[in-house]
Image (tube, rainbow, N blue to C red):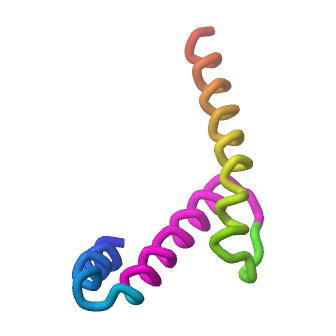
Amino acid sequence: MAKEIERLELAVDRDLVLAIGTAKELIETGCKTILTKKGIAFTKSEDLGDLTKRSPESYNSCRKESRTKRKAQTT
């Protein structure tokens, strides 16, 4: 990811279209990583809009895990 961020930073002044495309790819990769780690299925055809709409599903999964862990620690 560090390479993508560096490429994005360099492209902002030289090639705005490349910078925007790189940012989009970075966000898509982040969403896919989170969904995969949370065991939430997605298809290869889902675009950025589809993936970000799935964020609440992932977020709710994280919140449930955190509550379960806290509850286990206090008992």
Marker count (numbered): 0
Tell me what residue is drawn at x 39 percent, y 88 percent: 18
Tell me what residue is drawn at x 43 percent, y 80 percent: 20
> Along the line of sight, which residue is nearer the eye, 60 or 75?
60
> Along the line of sight, which residue is nearer the eye, 24 or 72?
24
Residue 20 on the magenta span: yes
> Along the line of sight, which residue is nearer the eye, 40 or 21?
21
- On the image, the x and y values in percent for residue 73 come to 56, 16
Outermost residue toward the top in this view: 75
Location of residue 34 by image quarter: bottom right
Location of residue 23 by image quarter: bottom left
Q: Is residue 64 above or below residue 70?
A: below
Main SS of the magenta part reads helix
Q: Is residue 39 above or below residue 28?
A: above
Query: Left or right of 27: which side holds 13?
Result: left
Query: Left or right of 24: which side holds 55?
Result: right
> Along the line of sight, which residue is nearer the eye, 36 or 16?
16
- On the image, the x and y values in percent for residue 7 come to 29, 82
Q: Is residue 36 above or below residue 70?
A: below
Quarter of the rendering occupied by the C terminus: top right
Residue 53 on the magenta span: no
- On the image, the x and y values in percent for residue 62 come to 63, 40
Start-end of magenta stretch? 19-41
Quarter of the rendering occupied by the N terminus: bottom left
